[in-house]
Image (spheres, rainbow, N blue to C red):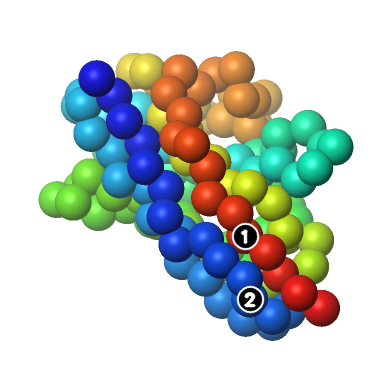
Amino acid sequence: QVQLVESGGGLVQAGGSLRLSCAASGRTFSTDTLGWFRQAPGVEREFVAAIWWSGGNTFYADSVKGRFTISRDNAKNTVYLQMNNLKPEDTAVYYCAASRGSLLAYYSDYAQPSKYRYWGQGTQVTVSS
């Protein structure tokens, strides 16, 4: 059974930092794309960042470029999202997701939630002003 378990969310002041973790288990992710998405109340789920499990190619939404960094630790089967210089508009539930055997290379693919087969339960990030 595939499981993605997020952790690391919380309450932080604007300008602060958080590191989210996504522990993945249940299958081999070597040919997958792992992504982070977020969803605020009343807003559609939006793409944040993605990484190829094998090769480490990374992709970012324009709104987080230069502030967020996605990485993975193959030995721990964990994907991270380091978030710096957080802003109130970053407040949302953050979800980890994995494609199934797809290295997504184009924005129209890696930024699309429907391209991901497995999802975590989400972790709340709240940034106060």
Is 100 on the left or on the right of 19, as rendered?
A: left
Q: In this view, does 6 lie above or below 113?
A: below
Q: Of callouts 2 and 1, which one flags the residue occurring earlier in the amino acid sequence?
A: 2
Q: Is residue 73 visible?
A: yes
Judged from the image, the secondary structure of the residue bearing numbered disc 2 is: strand
Q: x and y percent of residue 69 in the render? A: 50, 62
Q: Mark 2 points at which residue?
A: 12
C-alpha span from label 2 to label 1: 8 Å
Residue type (three-letter) at the residue carrying disc 2: Val
Q: How crowded is mark 2: few (under 14 residues within 10 Å), some or many (20 or more)?
A: some
Q: Mark 1 points at which residue?
A: 125
Q: x and y percent of residue 63 in the render? A: 75, 56
Q: Residue at x 42, y 48 (%)?
A: 6
Q: Residue at x 80, y 61 (%)?
A: 89
Quarter occupied by residue 111: top right
Q: Please tell me the numbered disc located at residue 5.
A: none
Q: Residue at x 52, y 61 (%)?
A: 9
- Residue nearest the observer in this picture, 32 or 119: 119
Q: x and y percent of residue 99 in the render? A: 43, 23
Q: How many marks?
A: 2
Quadrant into which the C terminus falls? bottom right
Q: x and y percent of residue 75 in the render? A: 14, 50
Pointers 2 and 1 in contact (C-beta within 8 Å): yes
